[in-house]
């Protein structure tokens, strides 16, 4: 099971380092406003072009905040300055570390939440959605396998909506880990059990889902907003994708094999470079987005 840890630019990073040292994988999440910044110094030329293509100041703020969280997390775990972390994308849009291809990364942002997954033990994916957001038959029909739809039929409306959102994030995390994007139909991916923190999905993969809460201004005067955060990571190098209890005959691409596990740094965030990279928080985001992705 992959550990989840909440962070701000100032930390706490010790629990993140401990989770990484123990599991070789970690999901970190935090409020988007805490990570907002105008700094462009760490962006690649490709990222700068994508930033300029964003249609609003809010979208540009979310883009910068998500890249800052990803770089801070990688820099802390690998004991390098966060401003020196280079990011790139595969032709299908999967984020990668060109200097450390042995490390898997994934990124998601929705509204006021940012989430990042990092793994030293093979492919990883993370996805988020705001809890309680409206869902309808069209979304369930687009996301759910037939067996899942049958399971959902008897649920009360609120439980039905949350189950659809959890399934949506689990499947998005899975296709992100595969690196296929939405070229794979989510209806062809099935989960035998969706309750609890560790749902049962495609063989050879481990899935974790949590409902987390983020606050504005440190939580003063508000209850915060809840989000579903789901992660998928490969546990068996021979696993194949998309064969499910309800789609046994679906042709299945072979999942990428995990890279050899690198030596983990000894509390890398305690280096001078790590401490320098985890200091001031940025300015506030002005509004929330409708959805998030890598």
Image: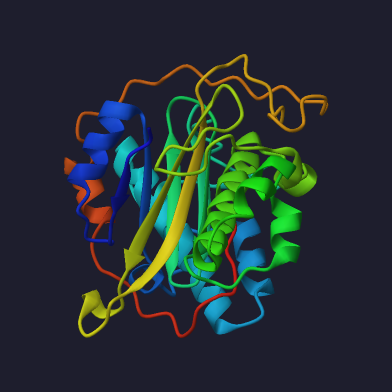
Which sits in the foreground, 47 or 238?
238
Residue under the point 35% across and 79% down: 283
Can you see residue 245?
yes
Q: Position of residue 157 (x, y in %)?
A: 55, 67
Can you see residue 92?
no
Q: Is residue 167 toward the left or the right of residue 285 in the image?
A: right
Quadrant where the N terminus is found in the figure: top left
Residue under the point 70% across and 52% down: 143
Determine which quarter of the picture holds residue 154.
Answer: bottom right
Q: Residue furthest top?
A: 238
Determine which quarter of the picture holds residue 270.
Answer: top left
Q: Is residue 253 toward the left or the right of residue 229 in the image?
A: right
Quadrant where the C terminus is found in the figure: bottom right
Which sits in the foreground, 175 or 52?
175
Q: Where is residue 195 in the image (x, y as percent from the top left)?
A: 46, 44
The image's colour scheme reads rainbow
Q: Where is residue 109 in the image (x, y as percent from the top left)?
A: 51, 62
Residue under the point 25% across and 68% down: 280
Q: Is residue 262 toward the left or the right of residue 144 in the image?
A: left
Q: Is residue 127 toward the left or the right of residue 146 in the image?
A: left
Residue under the point 41% across and 43% down: 196
Q: Position of residue 81 (x, y in %)?
A: 33, 47
Which sits in the foreground, 51 or 236?
236
How many numbered marks does the figure carry?
Answer: 0
């Amino acid at each position: 099971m992959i550990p989840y840890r909440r962070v701000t630019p100032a930390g706490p990073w010790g629990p993140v380092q401990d989770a990484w040292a123990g599991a070789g994988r970690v999901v970190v999440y935090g409020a988007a406003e805490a990570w907002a910044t105008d700094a462009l110094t760490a962006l690649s030329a490709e990222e700068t072009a994508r930033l300029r293509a964003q249609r609003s100041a809010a979208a540009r703020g979310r883009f910068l905040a998500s890249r800052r969280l990803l770089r801070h997390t990688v820099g802390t775990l690998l004991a390098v300055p966060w401003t020196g972390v280079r990011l790139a994308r595969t032709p299908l849009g999967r984020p990668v570390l060109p200097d450390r291809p042995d490390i898997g990364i994934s990124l998601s942002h929705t509204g006021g939440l940012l989430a990042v997954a990092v793994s030293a033990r093979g492919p990883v994916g993370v996805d988020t959605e705001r809890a309680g957001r409206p869902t309808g038959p069209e979304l369930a029909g687009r996301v759910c396998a037939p067996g899942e739809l049958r399971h959902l039929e008897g649920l009360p409306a609120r439980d039905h909506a949350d189950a659809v959102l959890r399934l949506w994030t689990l499947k998005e995390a899975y296709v992100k880990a595969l690196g296929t994007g939405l070229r794979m139909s989510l209806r062809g991916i099935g989960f035998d059990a969706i309750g609890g923190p560790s749902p049962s999905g495609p063989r050879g993969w481990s899935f974790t889902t949590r409902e987390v809460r983020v606050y504005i201004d440190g939580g003063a005067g508000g209850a915060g907003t809840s989000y579903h955060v789901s992660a998928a990571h490969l546990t068996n190098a021979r696993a194949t994708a998309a064969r499910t209890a309800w789609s046994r005959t679906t042709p299945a691409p072979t999942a990428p094999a995990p890279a050899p596990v690198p030596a983990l740094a000894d509390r890398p965030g305690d280096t001078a470079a790590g401490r320098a990279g985890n200091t001031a928080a940025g300015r506030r985001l002005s509004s929330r987005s409708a959805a998030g992705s890598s």
